[in-house]
Amino acid sequence: MPHARMIIWGLAILSVAAVGCSGGGAGDKRVPVFSVTGKVTMNGGPLAGAMVSFAPTEGQPTAIGRSNDAGEYSLTTYDSNDGAAKGIYKITVMKVVAATAGATADASHGTNYTGVAHGGKAAKGASDTGNLVPPTYADSEKTPLKFTVEEKANTYDIEIK
């Protein structure tokens, strides 16, 4: 499934590019954003290197973040780690690993796999597209994750089941 893997990477890159290109000009109509941080866990441990995306349901801009080695993330809308606009979001999570000859989803293979608990195994139901997270979490129409950003510092911890 190399083609599917390329599509997933392409979507992740487009999300980042859209955020990066959304600000900076004099005619920008930026909306206020509020800090959103949290931790992503899967199989009982931190999920490092996961792409977290807050997909808007009320017309606000998209916000994205990437989890660190401890599974912690901070969202970006316009500027690095600035947060997300007020409103309701559907949350998607992806952890895509590049396939190489003989590679398996095992923590002993290096930093692409760190943070996946219990021997680095993909979650039950994870797809063969290189995404270690079950596909439901990568689809904004099917994701069970939903969060309302309020006019304050927000925390949203995500547990992948």
Image (cartoon, rainbow, N blue to C red):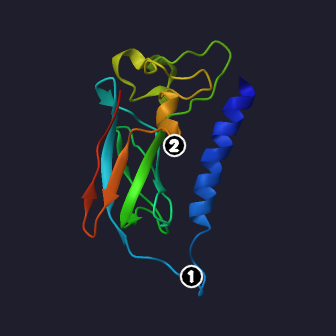
Mark 1 secondary-structure assignment? loop
Q: Which numbered circle lies on residue 28?
A: 1
User: Image point 33% across, 52% down: which residue?
Assistant: 147
> Which residue is at the far top?
102
Give the image location of residue 2, x and y in percent.
Answer: 73, 26
Q: Which numbered circle lies on residue 141?
A: 2
Q: Is residue 145 above or below residue 106?
A: below
Q: Is residue 80 above or below residue 155?
A: below
Mark 2 burial class by Cα count in 10 Å: few <14, some 14-19, many 20+: few
Mark 2 secondary-structure assignment? loop
In-front residue for pair 43/117:
43
Give the image location of residue 78, x and y in percent.
Answer: 50, 69
Foreground label between 2 and 1: 2
Give the image location of residue 26, x and y in percent.
Answer: 59, 87
Quarter of the image that includes the C terminus: top left
User: Image point 30% across, 28% down: which residue?
Assistant: 45
> Type of residue at label 1?
Asp
Mark 1 burial class by Cα count in 10 Å: few <14, some 14-19, many 20+: few
> Type of residue at label 2?
Glu
Quarter of the image that includes the N terminus: top right
Q: Tell me which label, 2 or 1, sits earlier in the chain.
A: 1
User: Image point 55% across, 15% down: which residue?
Assistant: 104
> Which residue is at the far bottom?
26
C-alpha distance separating marks 2 and 1: 29 Å
User: Image point 44% across, 76% down: which residue?
Assistant: 31
- In the figure, residue 81 lies in which quadrant? bottom left
Q: Taking 113 as reference, is 88 left or right?
A: left
In-front residue for pair 139/82:
139
Question: Looking at the image, how many numbered discs can be counted on the residues?
Answer: 2
